[in-house]
Image (cartoon, rainbow, N blue to C red):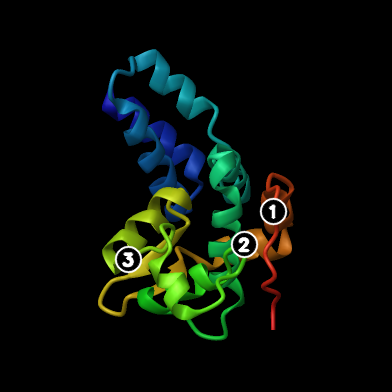
Amino acid sequence: DLTLYSSKIIEKADGVFLWVRLVIEGLLEDLEGATADDLSERLRNVPSELSDVYQKMVMAMNPKKRPEILNMLRLVLFSAEPLRLNEFRVALAAGATPPPKSFDEMVSSGSFIQTDKQMGARLRNFSEGLIEVKQGHDAVQVIHQSVIDYFLEESGLQFLQEGCKETWLLEAH
């Protein structure tokens, strides 16, 4: 019953609307083919703290994609100003391992993301929704200040990096 789920979500959210958004998005992903018991179990297992929700989202990230996710997050977190989508995809490609020898080599490689639309979809899919493109500005950013806090102050970047085999040379400036 939707009323029961709504009241459980409101109770666990404790007034944090971002928590509600993330939990509902997660539940909607699991909705197809799920039974009422499946959804109730999923809701019971959702952490109450936002940082724990982020931790769970990071754990759900595809391990093979974690090096690129780590690079994406570093670009977002350590850029002096938000990067536009076209800047973001060039910066991401420039940080590849091994690094390209020229701009032409970079844009002609099979791994170069050719369009902003493709980059936006990749950001959403790889980051579990933690990174977004601000509509109207094409600026790449995290969805909320608490994401920055989690990754920089609560060792979220370190946790993500532990799952990566390769590291990236970008450092905060």
Q: Secondary structure at mark 2?
A: loop
Other-residue count near label 1 (Cα within 10 Å), few / some / many at <14 / 14–19 / ≥20: few
Which of 138/43 is in front? Answer: 138
Q: How many marks?
A: 3
Residue kind at label 2, given as amino acid type = Thr
Other-residue count near label 2 (Cα within 10 Å), few / some / many at <14 / 14–19 / ≥20: few
**How far apart in space, not on screen, are marks 2 and 1 (Cα)?**
8 Å
Q: Disc 1 designates what residue?
A: 166
Residue kind at label 3, given as amino acid type = Gln
Q: Secondary structure at mark 1?
A: loop
Q: Quadrant of the N terminus?
A: top left
Q: Quadrant of the C terminus?
A: bottom right
Q: Disc 2 designates what residue?
A: 97
Return the mark for residue 114.
3
Whether residue 33 sits left or right of residue 16 in the image: it is left
- Above or below residue 51? Residue 93 is below
**How far apart in space, not on screen, are marks 2 and 3 (Cα)?**
18 Å
Residue in view at x 30 percent, y 68 percent:
116
